[in-house]
Image (cartoon, helix red, strand yellow):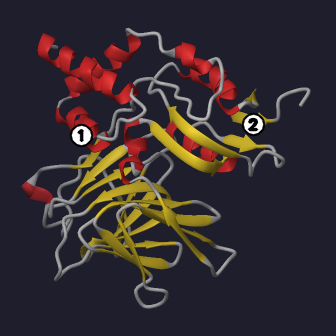
Amino acid sequence: MTADIRDQAALWMARARDPRFSDWDGLTDWLEADPAHNLAYEAAFAGHDLAGGLDTPSPVTASVAAPRRMKWVIGGGAGAVAAAAALVALVTPFSAGPASMVAETRPGELRMIALADGTRIALNGGSRLVFDRANGRTARLERGEAMFSVVHDENRPFTVDVGGQRLVDIGTRFDVVRSARASEVSVAEGAVLYDPEGAAVRLGAGRVLRKKDASSLVEVADVDPATVGTWRTGHLVYRGATLMRVADDIGRLTGQPMDVAPDLAGRAFTGVIVVPGTDRRQFFDRLGKVLDIDIASRPQGYYLKARAGR
């Protein structure tokens, strides 16, 4: 590892600690460019004690640590292009059905998918993404979360099915979340069209759409485009999110199931949480201070509950 890489990592770390930092895509691109960058970035964080800011919860509180590494699921290799239709050769095998190819991650595992047309998809932990074998520009997110950086083609628009509805890209970078209860789409750049044959909601950059399965209503609100997809570097950014949502997001990234007491599930949280790639015991110990709750360890995962005496 060269001194130049260490200096770059230290600079990125200092910038990412600034609450005004917004160049998450630039940081992600730098981390992905060379495995040594990831190691240097982790070492930069390991060399600094940033835990002091967690002792007293505030409206915006950050738990800062190194990002999770991403593994490439689909990479170069011309020999297998024909077998994978529009997808590039497989580095990690897909499971395949007669008409589909499946990319799946375990909880806590992040992967990157590169398509032959230049489109990139970051897949969060505990996610399942199904591709149409006959058309590599058609995918279905069955669960979890994926960040799409789509190379637009007017003649072959990229489409994503989520929760029984279809998204059509219009030159786009967007994030999709599919839980057991709802779907969410956030746009960082360009635009997407949600349910083109029905509601036909156009979402531009800085807009988020939420749709609960139990309701026919579609909610659209504003979101900071710079915060869309920042989970790729372990940064979770919230403005009035419920603790249930926070728990779901942390569970995906860490692979640790997190249940929430019913009386806390709807409590709102605004702030930034950075999930470490390693040494998570200390992270969970201090997360309760950030959220102003108690977190009980279980044989499998954690339970979020109100602080004793409150």
Query: Regarding mark 1 in the picture, which secondary structure is present there?
Result: helix
10 Å neighbourhood of mark 2: few (<14), some, or many (≥20)? many
Residue at left offset 28%, top offset 66%: 190
Given the image, on which type of amino acid does mark 1 rest?
Gly
Residue at left offset 33%, top offset 14%: 43
Q: Is residue 30 left or right of residue 249?
A: left
Q: Which residue is mark 1?
A: 26
Quadrant for the C terminus in the image: top right
10 Å neighbourhood of mark 1: few (<14), some, or many (≥20)? few
Q: Which residue is mark 2?
A: 304
For this rendering, which residue is in front, 16 or 139?
Answer: 16
Query: Regarding mark 2 in the picture, which secondary structure is present there?
Result: strand
Residue at left offset 47%, top offset 10%: 49
Callout in the foreground (1, 2):
1
Q: Single out the residue that lies furthest toward the right.
A: 309
Rounded to the nearest angstrom, the CA distance separating label 1 from label 2 is 34 Å
**Looking at the picture, how far across and down is residue 28, in whole percent?**
28, 39
Which badge, 1 or 2, is on the more N-terminal residue? 1
Residue 132 seen from this side: no
Residue at left offset 44%, top offset 27%: 277
Given the image, on which type of amino acid does mark 2 rest?
Leu
Residue 105 seen from this side: yes
**Looking at the picture, how far across and down is residue 236, in whole percent?**
49, 41
How many numbered marks have been drawn onto this rendered protein structure? 2
**Looking at the picture, how far across and down is residue 257, in whole percent?**
64, 40
Residue 183: image quadrant is bottom right
